[in-house]
Amino acid sequence: MLETEQIEYEKCVLVGVTTRHQNEDKMNEYLNELEFLAYTAGGEVTKRFTQKLDMPNPKTFLGSGKMEDVKAYVDQHDIGTVIFDDELSPGQQRNIERLLECKIVDRTYLILDIFAQRAQTSYARTQVELAQYQYLLPRLTGLWTHLERQRGGIGMRGPGETEIETDRRIVRDRITLLKGKMKTIDKQMSVQRGNRGSLIRVALVGYTNVGKSTLMNALSKSEVFAENKLFATLDTTVRKVVIGNLPFLLSDTVGFIRKLPTQLVDSFKSTLDEVREADLLLHVVDIAHPQFEDHIASVNKILDEIKSADKPVLMVFNKIDVYVPETYDEDDLMIERKGVHYSIEEWKQTWMARTNGDSIFISALNKDNFETFRQKVYERVREIHITRFPYNNFLYPEYEEGF
Ligand SMILES: Nc1nc2c(ncn2[C@@H]2O[C@H](COP(=O)(O)OP(=O)(O)OP(=O)(O)O)[C@@H](O)[C@H]2O)c(=O)[nH]1
Ligand SMILES: [Mg+2]
């Protein structure tokens, strides 16, 4: 089990730039998330370096002066890994690595590394391995090769460790092989999904760490692994859930994140098919997270990419038990009252009012408002059910009549 595993945290630093498109507040939010990712991968962040640039330096990401600062810090504090918030080009990666003489990991590779660490089934491992090879292919030349003494740790799980020096042809062969394997798996999965008969399919979707697995457990009395780290879930779990007398299938799957690497979206096709083929999506949101609106936008963007944006959705605002609005001093003219100051009641009057009752506020952990939530899910599933099977609608009464 991951929880009992003794993790030795590896010291690392974060690097990000503020640009015209990305102000300082945004930068800090992104770096907070990057720090959480680093922590999930087994890293302890000891310092952040940021710089204001029109655009990242094409050769070294940061300017050369700033890079010297990073180098001095890395040498002085025995830092194992430097993590960049954006995807580095193969050239940038090489240059920086030569300069800093430690592991250089970008956001994409960090996410791939966490996926590799989390993958439990051979199916998930195949998907992650494929994504990692696709990421590595253009970056093969000399990456980290002189770092023999540093084995294991962040960025060293999966193909990065042993295959780094092998030539591109071998990697391409491996990609072809894995793609073949995925095709077989995809076929099996699709047959399995086809065998589930006529039950309505509901999929939990949402940003990572919002409480999807917790909600799954609460609804279905199953034991899906939930943890306060990112990407606790990689494999899809499907459970039959019965509310009242109405059975349906509920699936819990991988969480989304801002800038989810495209390699992962591609290779997790089969996992994401669960979402693609669902009749109803429960879009779970962590309303206690200060950036929850950005999270919703990221999730919607990915849903769009996997052609699932027009499905019926129930917005589930979770973690109301820990939602605390920031205090607002009306006398302070410098402070503008905005979302972070709203109470939940006020939030309901915002754009959320336009979801036409297709939203619900709950705590999956404490089961606050859970009965209303179950009722809402029942109604939505029933609606789909009687549209699809009009001849047996007498089986499923209105929620109140029935119970
Ligand atoms: N306070 C509070 N915490 C919650 C609630 N729901 C879930 N959590 C916590 O949030 C963390 C993440 O929960 P998960 O259920 O693993 O979230 P997930 O969306 O499945 O995450 P990934 O699988 O990593 O994408 C855990 O520590 C949960 O205990 C809630 O309603 N209130
Ligand atoms: Mg989960």
Image (cartoon, helix red, strand yellow):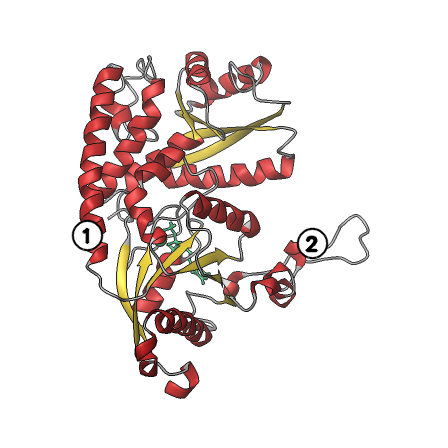
Question: On screen, 281 above or below 16?
Answer: below
Alpha carbon separation for disc pair 2 and 1:
49 Å
User: Which residue corresponds to the image point at 19% horizontal and 54% vertical from the top-left?
Assistant: 192
Task: In this rendered view, identify the residue nearer to me: 225 or 357.
Answer: 357
Residue 318: in sight, yes or no?
Answer: no
Question: On screen, 353 above or below 54?
Answer: below
Task: In this rendered view, identify the residue nearer to me: 355 or 165.
Answer: 355
Task: In this rendered view, identify the residue nearer to me: 34 or 283.
Answer: 283
Residue 359 picture location, percent across and down: 52, 65
Whether residue 196 sits left or right of residue 298 in the image: it is: left
Q: Which residue is mark 1?
A: 191
- Give neighbour class at mark 2: few <14, some 14-19, many 20+ (Cα, 10 Å): few
Whether residue 373 sits left or right of residue 145 in the image: it is: right
In the orientation shown, which residue stands out farthest toward the front? 391
Residue 336: in sight, yes or no?
Answer: yes
Residue 32 picture location, percent across and down: 52, 40
Q: Amino acid at mark 2?
A: Lys
Does the residue tagged 1 have its C-beta within 8 Å of any atom of ligand 2? no
Whether residue 54 sits left or right of residue 183 in the image: it is: right
Q: Amino acid at mark 1?
A: Val
Total numbered badges shown on the rendered structure: 2
Q: Quadrant of residue 90?
A: top left
What secondary structure is marked by label 1? helix
User: Which residue corresponds to the image point at 44% horizontal and 14% vertical from the top-left?
Assistant: 91
Quadrant assignment for the C terminus: bottom left
User: Which residue corresponds to the image point at 46% horizontal and 54% vertical from the top-left?
Assistant: 310
Residue 253 picture location, percent across and down: 33, 52
The tag on residue 338 is: 2
User: Which residue corresponds to the image point at 63% horizontal and 28% vertical from the top-left?
Assistant: 19
